[in-house]
Image (cartoon, helix red, strand yellow):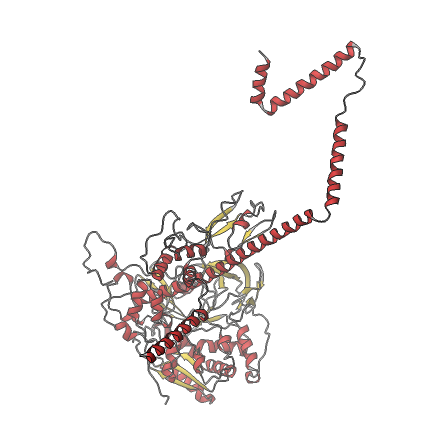
Amino acid sequence: MLSALIALGVLGVLFGLLLGYAAIRYKVEGDPLVEKIDAILPQTQCGQCGYPGCRPYAEAIARDEADINRCPPGGETVIIALADLLGRDPKPLDEECGEEKPKMVAYIQEEICIGCTLCIQACPVDAILGAAKQMHTIIESECTGCELCVDPCPVDCIDMVPVRQSLDTWKWPAPPPPPYEQPDDSAPNPQPAGAH
Amino acid sequence: MHRLFQFKGGVVLKEHKKDSTATPVQPAKLPPTLILPLKQHIGTPAEPVVAVGDKVLKGQLIARAGDTICAPLHAPSSGTVLAIADHPVPHASGMSAPCIIIKTDGEERWRPRERNVFNFAELSAQELRGIIRDAGIVGLGGAGFPAAVKLDPGGRPVDTLILNGAECEPYITCDEMLLREHALEVLAGLLMMRHALNAKHCIIGIENNKPEAFRALDEEIRNSGADVEVVEVPTIYPTGSEKQLIQVLTGKEVPAGGLPIDIGIVCHNVGTAYAVYRAVEFDQPLISRYVTIAGSVAHARNLEVLIGTPLGNLIEECGGNRRSLRRIIVGGPMMGTAMHSDAVPVVKATNCVLVESTMHDVPLPSRDEYTMPCIRCGNCADACPVNLLPQQMYWYARARDFDKIQDYNLFDCIECGCCDYVCPSQIPLVGYYRYAKSEIWNQEAEKRLADLARERHQFREFRLEREKKERAERHKKKRSAVAKGGSDDKKAAIQAAMERVRAKKSEQDNVPKNTDDLTPAQQKQVNDADQRRREQSREEKIRESPSESKAKITQDRP
């Protein structure tokens, strides 16, 4: 009886020590969920979600304070990915945040620019090159299209233009929906549902 | 007798090759303008070294290779550079890309010969690759990968060099005609490639529906006594695909995601060998190639075409009817792509121009308009030469489940179109795979951009934080400096400045002198002057703030 108690006690202490050690040795720094959410977000840093950047929004989602449908640049793809990750139901994009648009880049009309540096201060990814009283220009490859530079410009010389398509960015279109799936009012579709 | 192996699947197709092999190959007519896209190969675009208005000679370098995986461009004929601008290129998108456009002068004047090679065996592999690279040679079988890169095994031993003369797609006969007419040159080119690779064995694979080509090569090999094997392989589509031909000839399979060099094999097209021969022996860069013009044209045949010739010119030369033209396909019916315009030029990798008109339907694997639901018959899986499950991939592509579709090895798909061809429901399966592939590539590119944006955003935040700290530190230093040393000096300086201001002020406060003991007339003058001054100042006030002053004026006048 006593020996059994001692044996169990010793085992308990041993396992306790082991668990305690493991908790220190394999401690997870930071919140891995935030990292995962942040990896899905498009990193536009536009603030349309109401948070000052993608990471704060990711943290808010992880804390369950923000909904997953507040990222217009990410659109449906991001909402579905987040829903998948968090085991929630996907829902349509929150309209108060904005709408899903094709990817844009900022363009500075250089003959109008007065070199005030306000847009440089607004750019969240330092994608604008220029200095005080010098003409500014956008580094196109680094612009996320967040539109944050558009409002501060006092002479309204920044436009958002769609990203230029090239042979490298061109995508094969999805094949058109087959004829049997196209809506046809004259004849009811005889195809049973469930096949697709 | 060489032992042959089999790959799984594949289909037997109607050949349609007789029409274009009846007439010998002739050079195509010189077009008035040649359009040379800067990117005719896999890799980075070439960089132009000519300017608009420059005179160029045939074979002259017009764009150089800036990168390892790149191929230079040469003027296919003598003339003037008309423009360096965007022009539609042979691509499924129908988009434009930068091109050098040359107006030909009809003189066909060659640039002076720069190099003489009397015996290629004396050259090192490196030198030989340099010649091939400078000649702008890319894989002529269709993919257009720079040949010199593929001829550099990078220290890995090469057991077998395979020359691909299978040409398995219907209608295309340019390789067959090349072998029939230039078997000796192709053989010489093969030996040069072998020298560059230091390969132990050489095999030429030809499908058994080209007996003339086989006989021509066989004869040349026997005459020259070269240690090269020419092998007839069964005509099953897609034997002409690199990995399938390797499997048929050697029984070895190229690992998924790997290259043939991983198993000690290098595979080149017969056209590439011919181009290598011309480059080494005659110092001629790649400026022309054999192109099959077939389908709905009066005289289907092969022409030796200058790179950059617009497709419309070729079709016209072969008697194509512009009015009944429905579609131009570059490549074969199985893997080719439909062009959006006949102004696009022939590029280095163009092997066939297939014309479809209202009179002549090219039998394409599948037609969107006849698509029916999938009945899960599994024919596609049986036909797939790379052991994939086309049906599964189809569902995932439709559901945009791009993670799952990669689990089913989407990127091993060679887009041969066998699954399309056998599908009884005419589902455009390859269309779905191309769509899924480009979506995945796009997502990866976006991910890279997002990572870059994250990094830059984090750095900016770090920078702002650092600047704030530095500013705070500077302020602190200043404050402590004011509080501590040098306070007496500063105070004295302030005192002195205040003294100066006071002195100046008292100077200004001077009242006019000599105003005592004035005569009445003098007094009146002074009063008038004061009055004038007052009125002047009032007017000024009115001008400054009209409404206020007006009110004052009305008050002034009761």
Residue B139 higher or lower than B464, as above or below: below
Q: Answer left or right for B348 relative to A10.
A: right
Q: Position of residue A17 (x, y in %)?
A: 42, 73
Q: Answer left or right for B284 relative to B432.
A: right
Can I make out residue B106 in this image?
yes
At 57% across and 67% down in the image, what residue appears? Answer: B57
Q: Position of residue B317 (x, y in %)?
A: 41, 65
In this orientation, which residue lies closer to the viewer: B421 or A84? Answer: A84
Q: How many marks?
A: 0
Q: Position of residue B545 (x, y in %)?
A: 58, 24
Query: On the image, which quarter does residue B47 sit in?
Result: bottom right
Residue at the limit of the structure toward the front, as seen here = A2
Query: On the image, which quarter does residue B549 sit in?
Result: top right
In this orientation, which residue lies closer to the viewer: B250 or B164? Answer: B250
At 33% across and 70% down in the image, what residue appears? Answer: B417
Image quarter hosting the N terminus of chain B? bottom left
Q: Answer left or right for A185 relative to B254.
A: left
In this orientation, which residue lies closer to the viewer: B348 or B466? Answer: B466
Q: Answer left or right for A135 relative to B43.
A: right
In this orientation, which residue lies closer to the viewer: B402 or B437? Answer: B402
Image quarter hosting the C terminus of chain B? top right
Can I make out residue B84 in this image?
no
At 36% across and 62% down in the image, what residue appears? Answer: A85
Residue at the limit of the structure toward the top, as seen here = B520
Q: Position of residue A46 (x, y in %)?
A: 46, 52
